Image (cartoon, grey):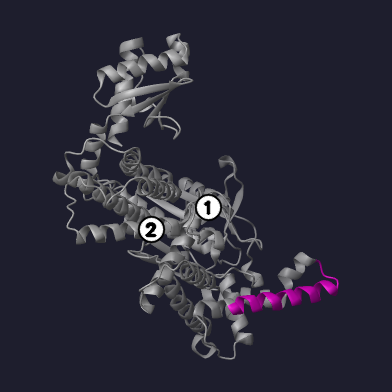
Amino acid sequence: MELQQTIAQHISEALQNLYQIMVAPAAILLQPTRKEFAGTFTFVTFPYTKSIGKTPDIIGVELGKYLKENTAEVYSYNVVKGFLNLEIDDGVWANVFQQIASDPDFGYSKIKKSKVVVEYSSPNTNKPLHLGHLRNNFLGYSVAEILKANGHEVVKVNLVNDRGIHICKSMLAYLYFGQNETPESAGIKGDHLAGKYYVLFDKAYKSEIDELVSSGMEVEKAKKEAPLMRQAQAMLQKWEQGDENTIRLWQQMNGWVYAGFDETYKNIGVDFDKFYYESQTYLLGKSTVEEGLAQEVFFKKPDGSVWVDLSAEGLDEKLVLRADGTSVYITQDLGTAELKYQDFSYDSSIYVIADEQNYHMQVLQAILKKLGKSYADGIHHLSYGMVDLPSGKMKSREGTVVDADELVAEMIETAHQQTDELGKIEGFTEIEAQQLYHTLAMGALKYFLLKVDPKKRMLFNPEESISFIGNTGPFIQYTHARIAAILRKAAELHIPTHVEAFAEVQSFHETEREVITQLATFPNVVQEAANLYAPSVVGQYAYELAKAYNRFYTEVSIFQETDPAALSFRVTLSKMVAQNIKRSMRLLGIEVPERM
């Protein structure tokens, strides 16, 4: 916000002129003034009492007086226990608003910055997406859009976990129990069909373990010796050897899953610029292991397995290739990191992965640094907490996963009930009503998952998320629809919204001032959200802007205003709020309705 920077510059000059203290404008911290006091910005004087030798209140009064007498921006001030509250002249707010209304790309950076690869979603082809995946997808998509708005060149990629022991489990169960079932014959999505067999494998595998344990075998040994596990491991080796029948079944089942994933991605509104597949990257990972052995970064143990010693990095020894020559997760991650850099020569690569993989990501970066990879320092793990429902943590192997498709369908049905009860679809066709239900459901779901700091583990409450009251997506969406109705009426009345029509307005109602203040902070919000990789910053902004507008709407008349300039200003103010709400919500991947 340029005004905030200007005020900081003035305070820096005041400290130097009044007290001969050099404080850079960037070091001047300004806070929003609390609602119960007059003012826009608050400067805390406590940190300067020792160097100046005066009480916080006296410093506040002297600075306030200086700023009022020597700057065009500050027209009044008040001091409350060492907090200097500065009131900004309405003429300044008029200029600020005119600049906002004149800039068609307001809030977006016009400076081109670095190239960033954002990797998110990363599903396994042995099961459908679940609630945790939704947080991952929404977080990755939103961070990518925020980085774009901040001037970065962004590539969105999806690494599909399409190979490995877990995939073989679903394949083996299908061979035993499938009876040539297909998504068409079963009447279910392909990813759900694969997930069905993953669960069946686990149930049968546990039965085998129980049998072995009851015959006297230790549990850990039984897990390794169970026939199904041995067969799954043998299938993985066959796959890596290119066995024709194994590859054919793998391609068939993965094909079903990809069709299911595509349908889900389209429904939840996320997309990707490029897909990577672990089946294509693990071989490059094996080459990286050979490279590491040649550099003596890695070492072999007597059984032939390959390891890296990361004790100097505060970690431990890490397996990078099994004794039988099959790869592990870190092997293919090494290959994917190399391939992504070859493809895009990125400045930074963001991995959106749950906090359960914090250690794994530390290991990946440490190995790449030991290998001397130039891109190692550019890796950033955007770690996020798990999502719980009141019923507890999800476990996909046990078939108790909170399925993403089912949750979205439930949210749409809840939106249907809520909007019908509140009478918000009068005059809608059936198609329009269905679209509104979907828009509100996705707004509720995405906003609830994104308004929380990514690192925090969270409890998702579907009913709370879809309320039209409080800090929710539907509340913000409804505010936009309300403004859209105002703008339609203004268009019918031919009320102009160009700057010249309201340029003479130089004094404002308190709520108008508050809305302009909120609008003016948008560029800072986009920058902060990009710097922190935190969509929650944008979400909170959209909520505060919607709240400020609703206060304005309640306290100030728009269409009963008789002064043409004031009327034009209020309509334009509404237009700018709608624009900023739409832009903010789109940065979160959320659409806003034009009417409700």
Judged left or right of residue 7, residue 300 is right
**Residue with the most extreme left position:** 500
534 relative to 273, above or below = above
Snapshot quadrant of residue 275: bottom left
Is the stretch drawn in magenta largely helix, strand or loop?
helix
**Quadrant (top left, top right, bottom left, bottom right) of the N terminus:** top left
The residue where tag 2 is placed is: 340
User: Would you say residue 206 sits in the magenta stretch?
Assistant: yes
**Label 2 environment density (alpha carbons within 10 Å; few <14, some 14–19, many ≥20):** some
**Label 1 environment density (alpha carbons within 10 Å; few <14, some 14–19, many ≥20):** many
Q: Nearer the viewer, residue 60 or 29?
A: 60
**Residue with the most extreme top position:** 53
Judged left or right of residue 334, residue 400 is right
Q: Secondary structure at mark 1?
A: strand
Instruction: Pick whichever of labels 1 and 2 is earlier in the sequence.
Output: 2
454 relative to 120, above or below = above
* The label number, if any, that marks residue 384 in the structure image: 1
Q: Amino acid at mark 1?
A: Tyr
User: Would you say residue 540 sits in the magenta stretch?
Assistant: no
Q: Amino acid at mark 2?
A: Lys
Q: Is residue 346 visible?
A: no
Q: Which residues are magenta?
A: 196-218
49 relative to 507, above or below = above
Q: Position of residue 374 (x, y in %)?
A: 38, 46
Residue ID at (46%, 14%): 49
Q: Position of residue 203 (x, y in %)?
A: 70, 76
Q: Secondary structure at mark 2?
A: helix
Point out the frontmost of discs 1 and 2. Answer: 1
Q: Position of residue 443 (x, y in %)?
A: 43, 61
Q: Pointers 1 and 2 in contact (CB under 8 A)?
A: no
Q: Is residue 259 visible?
A: yes
Q: Position of residue 418 (x, y in %)?
A: 49, 67
